[in-house]
Amino acid sequence: MADFKSVVEGHSGAAARWSQGKFMGGATFGSGGVCGPLSAVWIRDRKIGTNFNTDTKTAEGRDEVYQLKLNQKKNSEYVKEYLALFSLHRHFSQTWKDEISMSEALGVVTAGPGYYFIGLTNRGTGGQKLEGHAFAVDMFDLKFFDPNSGQASFALVDNLRACFLLWFRLTYMDLRGSGYLERYI
């Protein structure tokens, strides 16, 4: 697997490592992890100026992520409803029903300011439950967050775009199914 910090620094960015696996510490919620809830909390923390690393180390922060995971299982609009509590409203959404085009998605993301939530799925086989992943992007401050690897910060939009695309290709090429993107401001 590619090294997150090396890929980010290779695009003139700064990387802060983070691990969903360490956050969960062996806890499970059925299949999958908590990348969607973590990405939503990361967006919230970017908006209100809270330190994500500090926030998610508290019992309250962990409980909030796990509550969001429970909400995710019941409600496909859990990100929208959660971020609305912090005066962030969805202004745009796009869905790819067959195969997400990450280049197209990043074209939308890098076109303007906002906080972006990107959800991906694997195609799955034989009716198996689809596995997926989520990312968050802050286009106000040119940062992206991968819950499995960390946060990347950039001075230039082109560097963020190139790094995200390369990171996706190196790490998540198996997630070639449907996906969606939401913009919050």
Image: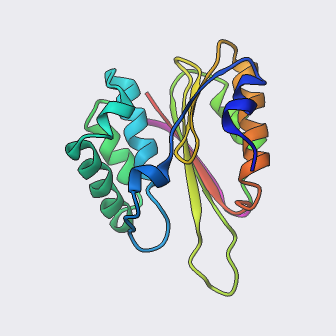
Residue 154 position in % (x across, y down): 64, 18
Q: Residue furthest bottom?
A: 126
Q: Is residue 148 above or below residue 92?
A: below
Q: Residue furthest left?
A: 60
Image quarter of the C terminus: top left
Q: Is residue 28 left or right of residue 141?
A: left
Q: Is residue 119 left or right of residue 70?
A: right
Q: Nearer the viewer, residue 8 or 107?
A: 8
Q: How many marks?
A: 0
What residue is drawn where x is 28% and y is 48%?
62
What residue is drawn where x is 41% and y is 42%?
40
Q: Is residue 120 left or right of residue 182?
A: right
Task: Report the span colored magenta.
Answer: 90-98
Q: Is residue 38 above or below residue 16?
A: below
* Residue 35 visible in the picture: no
Q: Is residue 73 magenta?
A: no
Residue 9 position in % (x across, y down): 72, 23
Asked which quadrant contains residue 13, the reply is top right
What residue is drawn where x is 79% and y is 47%?
169
Asked which quadrant contains residue 7, the reply is top right
* Residue 128 visible in the picture: yes
Magenta-drawn stretch, dominant element (helix, strand or loop): strand
Q: Is residue 9 left or right of residue 45?
A: right
Q: Nearer the viewer, residue 92 or 32?
A: 32
Q: Nearer the viewer, residue 148 or 169?
A: 148
Q: Is residue 16 above or below residue 63?
A: above
